Image (cartoon, helix red, strand yellow):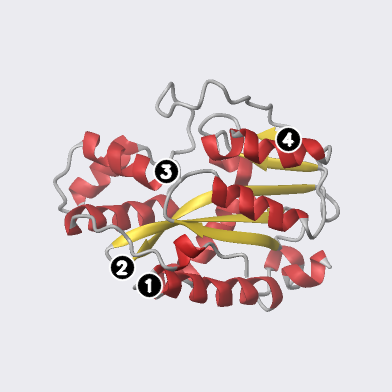
Amino acid sequence: MHVSKGCLYYEPVGIDPYSLELMDLIDRQFTETPFYGSRRLTAWLNRQGYIVNRKRIQRLMRIMGLESIYPKPNLSKRRKDHKIYPYLLKGVKIQKTNIVWSSDITYIRVGRGFVYLTAVIDWFSRYVLSWKLSNTLEPKFCVDALNEALTLSTPEIFNTDQGSQYTSKDFIKPLEDRGIKISMDSKGRALDNIFVERLWRSVKYEEVYIKDYRTARDAYESLKEYFLFYNNSRLHQSLDYLTPAEVHW
């Protein structure tokens, strides 16, 4: 089933309830307004009655892997030994499958802690080619998702953000070995990867926010059912009310 034993049996490390509550609020508001940075999120939380300072929100956003979409200097450092590739998709017309794939990471609440979810999606069909859960932001689960997707087909271009998971040699090598062009979003520009952002919005509102995952196993089993539904049954207005699977295959 391509599930790591560490993730399947992982018991989330406890985090203080107040920080976890703040992280849930940040996640929901950020899904609505991905252009909110730490200043606006701090102000928004204060208006909701949560008296917190910006440093705490910055720390929680780093833990969650969140970065707002507007450009800003030197808030998240990338590995100096990792190569950054230019954004290749400006003005590109995508008229069939396997032209552009992309990937991203999002935060998922699990019991008293949290895990991270990554997915690989085809831009034309919106088909989710693979997905993985992890209890850390180490590159391995992103590499595993990539390798699983590459067993199905090969894209012309693979687009990601500039996170260390995607600039790591382990992630870049399978792409270079297959001659796939590598594209990376401009710094702090989540909208360069808009189709994954739309996927996360659907996952959060149609699955995560209406469920109460107690363990990583619960999250895995429930998300497995959701992605089967998303690919094979969910009608997309942008696809003329076809499913991603009908368009992709």
* Residue located beneath label 1 in the image: 213
Q: How far, Cα to Cα, is label 4 from label 2? A: 36 Å
Callout 1 environment at 10 Å: few (<14), some (14 to 19), or many (20+)?
many
Q: How far, Cα to Cα, is label 4 from label 3? A: 22 Å
For image coordinates 70% across by 58% down, the residue present is: 148
| Chain-order first, disc 4 or disc 2 | 2
What numbered label is drawn on residue 66? Answer: 3
Q: Amino acid at mark 1?
A: Tyr
Mark in the foreground, 2 or 3? 2
For image coordinates 49% across by 64% down, the residue present is: 5
Mark in the foreground, 4 or 3? 4
Callout 4 environment at 10 Å: few (<14), some (14 to 19), or many (20+)?
many
Q: Locate residue 202, reporting x and y percent.
A: 54, 64
| Chain-order first, disc 3 or disc 1 | 3
For image coordinates 23% across by 49% down, the residue present is: 45
Q: Amino acid at mark 4?
A: Ile
* Residue located beneath label 2 in the image: 111
Image position of 175 (left or right of 24): right
Q: How far, Cα to Cα, is label 2 from label 1? A: 6 Å
